Image: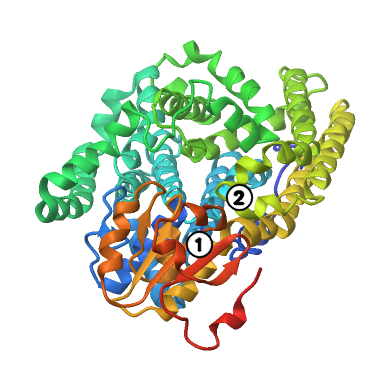
Amino acid sequence: MTDSSAVDTHPFSTRTLHLTFLLICGCLLLLLGLADVGLTDRDEGSNAGAAREMLETGDWISPTLNYEPRYAKPALSYWIIAGTYALFGVNELTARLPSVAFGLALLVLHYLFLHRLLGPALAFCGSLVLLLNVEFVGIHRLVLTDPELVFFTTLATYGFWLGFCDPGRDRRFLWLFYIGMTLGTLAKGPLGILVPLLGIVPYLTLTRQWKTYFAEGRPLLGWTVCFLIAVPWYLAMLALHGADYVAAAQANTAGRFANPMEGHGGTLLFYFPILLLGFFPWSGLLPAALWHTLKEWKSFRTGETGARGEQGLLLFCALWVSGIFLFFTLSATRLPHYVLPLFPPAALLVAVLWSQFLKNARPDGLTISTRLVLVTGYVLSLVLAFTPVIYESVRHQIAVHFPAAEKVDVGPTPIVLAIVILLGVATFRYLVREKARRPQAFWVLSGMMGTFLLIVILFALPRFGKYFVNPPQELATIAGFNLEPQDTLIHYGRKLPSLTFYAKRKVQFINPGEHEKFVPHLEKNGRLMIILPANLHDRLPDPVAAFPPVLQRYGFLLLSREPMVGGVQEGSKN
């Protein structure tokens, strides 16, 4: 990392080198071991399953899950995943490939935007900041709708800046603004429009540019195009499903904001630790970056002239980060990945702040930023070091849903991760004190996070998948292979939507205590199989409890009323 003011005499070759390096790093972190862990419940299994059913049924309008209507999300993400299935087959890898692709595309988009406005050094720094953190890598390795949302909303917001705010603005970029919001809306509903506006509306208001926007921002044409592209799918759903779709859409939009859904609540402080750890170590620099920018807000209330250029861009990004954070903090439904849309502007702000740290011997904000990085790193390493002890204390509670926890320990990985973080932040502390060594401090943090993420991907995730995620899915795959369409597959216990993906058929989910739901299935002809955690076997009602177990997989059982076909039991594993 060098001073951003340095002259780039070979911009094309430098840009190519930077992008090649970023894409290699991105592919390693996002593709390596991508299928080692089965689809996690609930969202991953639900999204992958809905896309599989869309491809199977040929109904590209109305998403279903377990062959029942699924109105939680619009159809664009399912179209993309189902298209990937059609090209490469149906499995965990192909289900997750779209998220990886959108993560890499976001990385390239972010770099090109920063390169155009701030130069190659800041673009490279800001892109590494965006990539090298737990939340970016984690979310883009999962079958979620957020990678699409974040890419399209970032595309929209960057397009708005380039087409309206940049001193050398090209009005054609405004189409990225409107098209990005349109596609974001088809990926995740109104958030596709709201996320960009959380930065744009405060910016236009503070800088008194609403008149200019209405005169030069092509709002009538742009919003009309946005409406014409996005609305047909919603109208089709309304025509097909009427009041049921309206009620579900309201529950998953305004309802999520007003009331916690599916137990995803938390306090108003929920996102502070999420951002601190999810964006670590760069989260330690973000407060100073926001403060340096927002404290000068009054100087931007001079209209168009004072709001453009690098300082205007920083204000825009600071307002965007603050708006997203505040909105999701006020929302009653809270999940860690909801704040992912603020990561691109946050990475830009951190990169600019770091470039200022390189220019001055004692820059403002360096001390508090260093302390935040160190404190967060030391606390994180301490928690990781004590993970084996913590795990032992809660082992029995975990085993309620993951029976293998009774016999499997966490292994040495948490201790190794703790050492990586401890050495990284300690070295950072030594290097960051002197201006001459400060460039190396950035690379130490980058190397620390790259090493941390690779260890998690190569060692922690496969172990987690093998014992805690994959077992019931392996049984569902075997059951689905042996059942005919008229046969029945039941899962008994905590609902696992991913089983429908692996069984490739409808699964009947029955909770403990709902024993009356067994009756109609017992009365049906045909084969009947049941997947359940072994620790729930003694809670089964008669006559289901008498069904013999035909397979066992790390604490999960597959029961069958009839014998299995020959040869399948060879794959059983205790």
Q: Which residue is mark 2?
A: 137
Residue drawn at x 45%, y 32% is 334
Q: Is residue 110 above or below residue 302?
A: below
Residue 37 lies, in percent from the top left, at 60, 61
Display colour scheme: rainbow
The total of numbered circles placed on residues is: 2
Farthest residue to the bottom: give it: 566
Quarter of the figure that contains the N terminus: top right
Q: Amino acid at mark 2?
A: Val
Q: Nearer the viewer, residue 255 or 547?
A: 547
SS under mark 1: helix
Residue drawn at x 61%, y 55% is 468
Q: Is residue 379 above or below residue 531?
A: above
- Mark 2–mark 1 Cα distance, whole angstroms, equals 12 Å
- Residue 11 lies left or right of residue 477; in this view the side is right
SS under mark 2: helix
Q: Which residue is mark 1?
A: 96
Q: Amino acid at mark 1?
A: Arg
